[in-house]
Image (cartoon, rainbow, N blue to C red):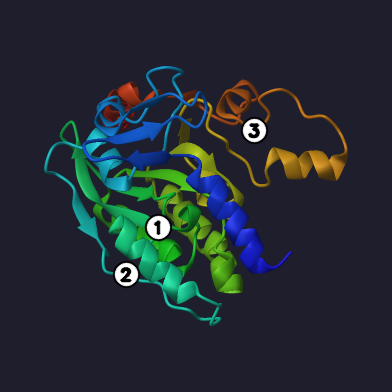
């Protein structure tokens, strides 16, 4: 199997998370779990949660930001950062251009400052639509700068993670971001900063193995897949049947790896309570 074959399979799998069909009058969204179809407007109004089975669909970063931030308070930082092609990986540049045109984002991480119920915070959101939210040099650098800014300004730090891990098109440059972001978060916490890590579906690979697991408080959305390697890989490696729900949020909460599972409709309220308690 070639590298192109691997990417075609991954692209097919990730695109199946949200299937949208268009006709002359309306966009419809199909739930990947129950296959129920509804108009995009109705699913968006329900915060991208399937009204039939409760499945959590992916959210674009700006929609998540609007969901938790005070209206008009978000100010983006480092929004012009773009990835280069240090390894001259085949078609990497074309993929970046295509994803920029499709998502409107320059890379897989949106960061800035905002207010949540009046409390100023530094906020970052990974975008699973952009190369599966993989962490390359730009993502790592933006996380570093957001964390350092939060430290200088004495702001709480909140990061919503949704990632397939490291960005293989950047090789070792991508893997270095694990140590880079983990060190930045560690310095921030040692200086008294509050880091709220919010894990969404899926949070895997190098992101889960670095900064995303270092929160003072770690929250997750219901049924989010949270792991380093996926269940199928582990089962094939150890040759044993895994427990039901293995590596999903509820299993991790039961085994002490999470502090709470938070539904989307309660996300803003929960974040405000945690921030207010910290201020006191």
Q: Residue at 42%, 17% (x, y): give it.
A: 52
Residue at far right of view: 239
Which corner quadrant of the image does residue 170 belong to? bottom right
Q: CB atoms at circles 2 and 3 under 8 Å apart?
A: no
Q: Is residue 271 left or right of residue 116?
A: right
**Where is residue 268, by image quadrant?**
top left
Quarter of the picture holding the C terminus: top left
In the rendered structure, are the residues bearing label 1 and label 3 in contact, judged by CB atoms less than 8 Å apart?
no
Q: Which mark is residue 108?
A: 1
- Considering every residue shown, the one lying at the far front of the view is 24
Label 1: element kind: loop
Q: Secondary structure at mark 2?
A: loop
Above or below, 143 relative to 223: below
Residue 247, which numbered label? 3
Label 1 and label 3: CA atoms lie apart by 23 Å
Q: Which mark is residue 81?
A: 2
Judge the density around disc 2: few (<14), some (14-19), many (≥20) Cα neighbours within 10 Å.
Answer: some
Please count the marks in the image: 3
Instruction: Work out whether residue 135 or residue 182 is closer to the camera in this orientation and state it.
Output: 135
Give the mark nearest the N terminus, 2 or 1. 2
Q: Residue at x 54, y 29 (%)?
A: 258
- Image position of 72 with respect to 257: above or below: below
Using the numbered discs, state the Cα–Cα distance from disc 2 to disc 3 in whole angstroms. 33 Å
Residue 234 rendering spot, x and y as whole percentages: 77, 42
Q: Residue at x 58, y 24 (%)?
A: 253
The N terminus lies in quadrant: bottom right
The percent position of residue 121, horizontal first and vertical second, equals 26, 44
């Amino acid at each position: 199997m070639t590298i192109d074959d691997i990417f075609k399979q991954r692209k097919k799998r990730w695109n199946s998370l949200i299937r949208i069909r268009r006709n002359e009058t309306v966009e419809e969204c199909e739930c990947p779990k129950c296959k129920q179809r509804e108009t995009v407007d109705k699913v968006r109004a329900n915060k991208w949660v399937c009204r039939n089975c409760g499945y959590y669909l992916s959210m674009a970063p700006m929609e998540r930001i609007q969901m938790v931030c005070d209206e008009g308070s978000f100010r983006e930082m480092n929004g012009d950062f773009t990835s280069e092609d240090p390894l001259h990986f085949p078609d990497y540049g074309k993929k970046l251009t295509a994803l920029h045109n499709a998502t409107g984002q320059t890379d897989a991480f949106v960061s800035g400052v905002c207010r949540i119920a009046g409390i100023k915070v530094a906020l970052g959101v990974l975008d699973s639509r952009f190369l599966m939210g993989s962490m390359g040099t730009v993502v790592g650098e933006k996380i570093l700068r957001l964390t350092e800014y939060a430290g200088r300004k004495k702001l709480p730090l909140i990061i919503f993670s949704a990632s397939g891990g490291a960005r293989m098109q950047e090789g070792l440059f991508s893997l270095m971001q694990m140590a880079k972001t983990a060190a930045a978060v560690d310095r921030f916490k040692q200086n008294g900063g509050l880091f709220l890590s919010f894990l969404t579906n899926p949070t895997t690979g190098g992101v889960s193995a670095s900064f995303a697991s270092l929160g003072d408080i770690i929250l997750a959305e219901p049924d989010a897949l949270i792991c380093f390697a996926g269940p199928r890989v582990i089962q094939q490696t150890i040759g044993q049947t895994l427990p039901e729900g293995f590596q999903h949020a509820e299993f991790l909460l039961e085994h002490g790896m999470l502090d709470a599972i938070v539904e989307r409709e309660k996300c803003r309220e929960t974040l405000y309570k945690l921030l207010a308690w910290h201020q006191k």
